[in-house]
Image (spheres, rainbow, N blue to C red):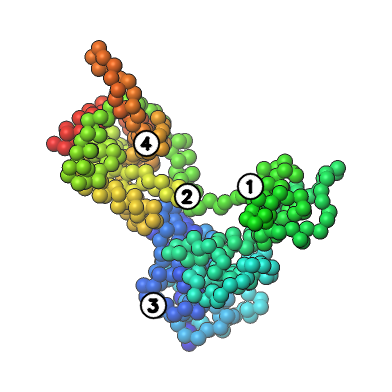
Amino acid sequence: MSVLHALTVPKWGMSMEEGEITEWRVSVGDTLAVGDELVDIETSKIVNAAECQVAGTLVRIVGEVGRTLKVGMLMGVVATGDTSDAQIDDFVVKFVPDASGSSLAQSSDAKAPATPASQAQPVVPGIPAAAAAPVSTGALSQGPDDAGVKASAVARRIARAHNINLNNVPATGRNGRVSKRDVEQAGAIQVVAASLSHAAKPTAGSQRSTEDDTHIASTPVARRLARSLNINLNDVTATGKRGRVSKEDVEKAAVAETGVAFYREQKLSGMRKTIAARLTESKQTIPHYRVSVDVELDSLLQQRAYMNGTLGHKISVNDFVIKACASALEQVPEVNVQYAEDCIRQFDQVDISMAVAVKGGLITPVIRNVGAKGLPQIAAASSDLARRAQAGTLGVDEFQGGTFSISNLGMFGVDQFDAIINLPQAAILAVAAGVKKPVVRGDSIVPATVMRVSLSADHRAIDGAVAAQFLQALKGFLENPASMLL
């Protein structure tokens, strides 16, 4: 007798509600052991690998790559012992999601189903209907055996259905593997621009070629796109390699004929959805106000040059800013707070969230207890967190729970900007670039490196005078860096 086990979307962190399946690391038929990494799931901020909690054989993948599933929903089915497709179908149909996020929410003996498989309506994964029939891929089908090419299970199935040799597909997936998206892009299997096909049809009085265009040299992708947009390749100016018509050439021709801008739609990632929701909530619910001050950095830059050059450290200007903020928050603790409806939470420890740009959005890893750390420790922590944030390997507890945020765009040459408060915090510091400017010292005008910082504060918790005191303290620490090292 076989026992079927449900693989469900786990719950990582209290705020997690859903996750997007980005890549399966195993295929149907693989033998699994407890602890095996099964599938990569992108949550609001990171990509984590769900692990198997039971030994057995993967007999069904329900959560296809690209699908967004709520916590507790079914991703796949594992069996211990022999089982039939009908029994698996029946198990999938009768599955009830468990919002607790248990990775093995349900299991059952695989007995004969009450409803024949032909009458059941299971959510069975497979190749999309639009991609079910093989298409002519020309040169994409040529090449040596691709059995050794690293590719996700879904990517390999789609490639096989479309007669695409994986040796011809550039790999952009995790760990150098070919992903589902790589195969689709290489074979132009899904073209969002097809929505323009109705606009690309001939209009009255338009002069378009009717001659056979099969002799026109073009890439397979360009020819399929031209066919879907009703573009004759005789009307397309070729700019591709060796005089071939490229996909971009067809897109330009479609725009020229219709006057409609060519566009592609990109599905929002879980991270982008969360950023949109949280920042909208922040702007709508928090009464922001902003105060700014210019800081002269010459003494700080000299101190940094000494510590890096003579002492061999690797400390950035941003590391100095993080340390100065911690010192200022300890001096003006009324800014190290959160508004909580019926109270204001006052934090004794300074945990600073630093904004890090990552592919598809941003994330704010937290440096804990900054006040107790020296500059070399802060530099090491910030570098490590930024690297792992960009690699998508942060743990949930490493980007939640900060008490104050810093967003630094100085490396992009920005003169000034205002940042949106990072809920549930009450303040965020926006840091611009340091630039040479003339400043007045006494009766003289001298050059100095000046950096503007702007504090966005929650007026429900932080009054204007308090914000000004914080910036005054921050300016003092940055302009006299030795004072924050005491």
Q: Which residue is mark 1?
A: 263
Q: In the rendered image, which residue does mark 2 sit on?
A: 360
Residue 33's disc is 3
Question: In this rendering, is residue 39 above or below 407?
Answer: below
Q: Helix, strand or loop at disc 3? A: loop
- Of discs 3 and 2, which sits in the foreground? 2
Q: Residue at x 25, y 17 (%)?
A: 441
| Disc 4 target residue | 410
Residue 14 x %, y %: 38, 55
Q: Which amino acid, mark 1?
A: Tyr
Disc 4, SS? helix
Q: CA distance from mark 3 to mark 2?
A: 33 Å
For the point 56% across and 52% down, the residue is 267
Q: Nearer the viewer, mark 3 or mark 4?
A: 4
Query: Nearer the N terminus, badge 2 or badge 4?
Result: 2
Image coords of residue 103 (percent x, y): 42, 68
Residue at image coords 32%, 20%:
438
The type of residue carrying mark 2 is Gly
106 relative to 449 in the view: left or right = right
Q: Is residue 479 above or below residue 45?
A: above
Q: Position of residue 216 (x, y in %)?
A: 74, 58
Q: CA distance from mark 3 to mark 1?
A: 45 Å
Q: In front of the other: label 2 or label 4? A: 4
- Mark positioned earlier in the residue sequence (3 or 2): 3
Q: Residue at x 81, y 59 (%)?
A: 212
Inspect the image, locate mark 3, and give the three-letter code of the amino acid beneath it.
Ala
